[in-house]
Amino acid sequence: MASFAEVAGPFVEMAHKIVWCSVATVDKQGRPRSRILHPIWELDDQGLVGWIATGPTPVKLAHLQASPYVSCNYWTPAHDTCMAECAAGWVDDAATKAAVWDKFVSAPEPVGYDPAMIPGWDNAQSPGFGVLKLDPWRLRVMPAAAMVTGEGTISWRA
């Protein structure tokens, strides 16, 4: 198992190149549900945190209330993959929601975009705009070649 420092940078690099990932939650009966979302990841000396701008739908709200964890899986057609398993929670304070909005607006493409293009998201305080904070406890980066050679996969677990 690799150290956090060995995995976190390559994870962010691959995730931000792929951009969209399958995010799975689990309902109160233990049944999974996946959807495609667009996290942005921040790596600094404090650690790694992910942010997802998403609508707080009844399903997402109920699933995260039942089990506050998500699995984020990225994949390319060339079969490069990376994964983050995370504790997840809704952010309610206005300052953090505004900061996350600005992160997406100011990030370079393809990770950055203007959230106002989403219907009902006029600004960070729009009722339909929600923010999920992701705190990873497990990361894995697996280049496509690792599927053939068995070498090159790196993993970290808190």
Image (cartoon, rainbow, N blue to C red):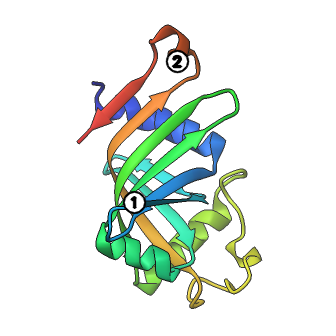
Residue 147 is marked as 2
x and y percent of residue 38 in the render? 60, 58
Element type at mark 1: strand
SS under mark 2: helix
Q: Which mark is residue 34?
A: none
Which of the pair 91/108 is nearer the observer? 91
Which residue appears farthest toward the top when viewing the image?
A: 149
Residue at the (57%, 78%) spot, across then down: 55
Disc with the residue nearer the chain's start (1 vs 2): 1
**Three-letter residue code for mark 2:** Met
| Residue that appears at 46% across and 86% down | 94
Q: Residues within 10 Å of mark 1 (few under 14, many from 20)?
A: many
Residue at horizontal 31%, vertical 51%? 46
| Residue 112 % position (x, y) | 67, 58
Q: Is residue 61 above or below residue 110?
A: below
Packing grade of label 2 (10 A; few <14, some 14-19, many >=20) is few
Circle count:
2
Gap in Å between the C-alphas at discs 1 and 2?
27 Å
Q: Residue at x 45, y 69 (%)?
A: 132
- Counting from the top left corner in percent of width and height, residue 103 is at 57, 64
Is the C terminus in the top left, top right, bottom left or bottom right quadrant? top left
Q: The N terminus lies in which quarter of the figure?
A: top left
Mark 1 lies on residue:
134
> Observer-nearest residue: 108 or 65?
65
Front-most of 22 and 121?
22
Query: Which amino acid, by three-letter code, is at mark 1?
Result: Leu
Q: Is residue 49 above or below residue 121?
A: above
